Image: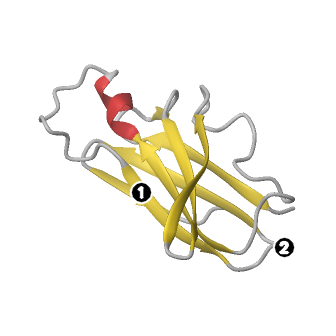
Amino acid sequence: MSGLTTHILDLTHGQPASNVTIELYYYSNGERNLLKTSKTNSDGRLDQPFLSEEEIKLGIYELDFHIGDYFRSKYLELPDPLFLDQVPVRFGVANLENHYHVPLLISPFGYQIYRGS
């Protein structure tokens, strides 16, 4: 199984981050090209993989996680401007036989990203 998936966990509230906009870009000849935009569901995941095994190709991708609106919706006392509004994650796909899962652990003041399974 190959393809690209992601999910977001809100460390501040201890729950999945729902209704977060995520943009997926592909780099070609040094230019960033928007491929898809989606929103997380109630489980902090996308309803479908961002890229299926037929769609994914070798190269450099970027996920832009729009977490600022998510934390604003939680009615937290946050600075203006936000410390983190968007979290871009650039990564490479080097093997089309592998599945690429890119989870994000998030709070208003920090994040962790890793290659999941």
Residue 35 x, y percent position in the rendering: 63, 51
Label 2: element kind:
loop
At a point 38% along the width and 39% down the height, the residue shown is 67
Query: Cα distance, mark 1 to mark 2?
Result: 25 Å
Residue 45, quarter of picture = top right
> Image point 59% across, 66% down: which residue?
115
Q: Is residue 35 above or below residue 47?
A: below
Residue at the extreme left of the image, as rendered: 80
Q: How many marks?
A: 2
Q: Amino acid at mark 1?
A: Pro
Left or right of 88 on screen, residue 93: right
Residue for point 38% across, 52% down:
87
Q: Which residue does the image show at 87% across and 61% down from the upper left? A: 1
Q: Quick one: 112 or 84, which is closer to the camera? A: 84
Task: Check disc 1 and report its element: helix, strand or loop.
Answer: strand
Is the residue marked by circle 1 packed among few (<14), some (14-19), or many (20+) residues within 10 Å?
Answer: some
Kindly identify the amino acid type of the residue bearing the numbered disc 2.
Glu
Q: Categorize mark 2 by other alpha carbons within 10 Å: few (<14), some (14-19), many (20+).
A: few
Q: Quadrant of the C terminus?
A: bottom right
Q: Position of residue 71 (x, y in %)?
A: 32, 30
| Position of residue 40 in the picture relative to residue 80 (left or right) | right
Residue position for label 1: 88
Which one is in front, 5 or 28?
A: 28
Q: Is residue 107 above or below residue 97?
A: above
Name the mark on residue 97. Answer: 2
Nearest to viewer (mark 1 / mark 2):
1
Please tell me which of labels 1 and 2 falls first in the chain: 1
